[in-house]
Amino acid sequence: MDEYAYDRMRREQWLAGEARAEGVDRRTLLRMLAAAGAAGPVLSAVGGAGVARAASPVPGIVKPLPAEWFVPRGTNAEMRWDSVAGTGYHTPTERFFVRNHTSTPLIDPAGWRLRLTGGGLRRGDVEFDLAALRRLPSTRITALVECAGNGRSFFHSQQGRAVPGTPWTLGGVGSASWRGVRLAELLHRAGLRRGAVDVMPSGLDPEFVTGGLSLGRVRRPLPLAKALDDVLVAYEMNGEPLTPDHGAPVRLVVPGWIGIASIKWLGTVEVSTEPLYSPWNTDFYRLFGEAYPEGGSAPIGGQVVKSAFELPWGATLEAGRTHRLTGRSWSGSAAVREVEVSTDGGTVWHRAHLLDRPRKDGWVRWSYDWRPERPGGYQLRARATDRRGNTQPVATVHNREGYLFDAVVAHPVTVARPTAGQAAS
Ligand SMILES: Nc1nc2c(c(=O)[nH]1)N[C@H]1C(S)=C(S)[C@@H](COP(=O)(O)O)O[C@H]1N2
Ligand SMILES: [Mo]
């Protein structure tokens, strides 16, 4: 099921009055879309009624955010790539990036219910509590969660054009193992009506307020075909119950789709016989700019190819020694086929050694041994290619919101003369 084609179709249906936009009235949304087309992203300002937790560098996030592991970014926390070498294939939960539109709610698991509702159900509403969910057949999957804006800051720092929105470097992504019940299982148990077309999961976090308007709960429709395919209603992350910041007690995991699809703190799932539309459909995830049509591109689809070094920005390395450089590469559409590293500004590329068997919905760890002889400043580059032939370009075509940065990132390091005491080693 193609996310891109789906969102474009729903948007056209909505503009033609054939899809329902629940929660926000049509005039308001049209006004916001017009503003988005003219003046920058609508969803960058954050209001919301969450509890501010003063001790945290990011009010609204519950878990500790040590400065060695995270960079605070507004209501979000970015994972530091220089902190994850040697942490294993999956991102440890305590190091996983957090993207909150408002703030993390604390939900009592005993009182929590998931309600399936809507005209697309044959026998009316159905509720599951956590115990009921845990009694159902469970599935474990590996999937990345990656924010659509991951890499955004490089539009400015590397390509010279500022873009608004959260200035992620490359740490708006994580890999985890997820356990839960397939959404298909719940939908079949609830009983689907033949005319059901869309599924709208909705979060229990505070309503999202921007420009004085509440857009309601964070929610984003999925086509029934995707919902019945590989979507997981997850209650475990990396073998433990979900933690508050990552959606406890239950979140959705939508493999291969941008992070916003994986609704946290899942409360209701509406099953509709009408096409559904929400502010989190890709009107706010479209590409604007001189390379795109006047009203913006069609909505963006899956994630692109990226690579990151597990190395501090501006690291100092000693000359005349071999350094094992490590990193990870991933792609939204296929397994990574190859990773190359350049240490000379992108002229000569060397094949990196892949440490994992490449897989779809996961990243691959790699290493490259580098022995710099001459002291000075260098830029390290890693470039991945996936099995569909998607590769990382020298530059990403500019788009105003800074989505889908896929260009090779130049990672600066300094090579220093060996200090006297170490020269003999
Ligand atoms: N209910 C709810 N779900 C949500 C969000 C949110 O703010 N509220 N943020 C979304 C976005 S934009 C992303 S990128 C992912 C981030 O998941 P994480 O915080 O577990 O890393 O959650 C998604 N699910
Ligand atoms: Mo996101």
Image: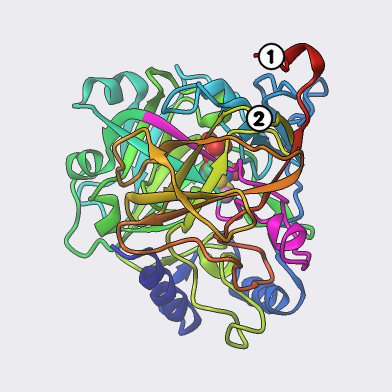
- Distance in Å between CA atoms under marks 2 and 1: 11 Å
Q: Quadrant of residue 252?
A: top left
Q: Label 1 sits on what residue type?
A: Ala
Looking at the image, which is closer to me, 315 or 88?
315
Q: Residue visible at 36% across and 50% down?
A: 336
Res. 260 mark: none
Is 164 colored magenta in this rendering?
A: yes
- Where is residue 9 shown, x and y percent of the image? 39, 76
- Where is residue 270 shown, x and y percent of the image? 38, 51
Q: Label 2 sits on what residue type?
A: Gly
Residue 235 in sight: yes
Q: Quadrant where the C terminus lies?
A: top right
Q: Quadrant of residue 36?
A: bottom right
Looking at the image, which is closer to me, 380 or 67?
380
Q: Residue visible at 59% across and 68% down?
A: 396
Is 288 colored magenta in this rendering?
A: no
- Is 245 left, or right, of 315 in this rendering? left
Majority SS type along the magenta span:
loop
Q: Residue visible at 81% across and 16% down?
A: 420
Q: Which residue is mark 2?
A: 320
Q: Which comes sooner in the sequence, label 2 or label 1? A: 2
- Is disc 2 surrounded by few (<14), some (14 to 19) or many (20+) residues within 10 Å? some
Which range is magenta? 148-177
For label 2, the SS is loop
Res. 424 mark: 1
- Where is residue 368 shown, x and y percent of the image? 49, 37
Q: Is residue 110 above or below residue 32?
A: above
- From this viewpoint, which residue is outermost toward the bottom? 294
- From this viewpoint, which residue is outermost toward the front? 424
Looking at the image, which is closer to me, 233 or 79?
79
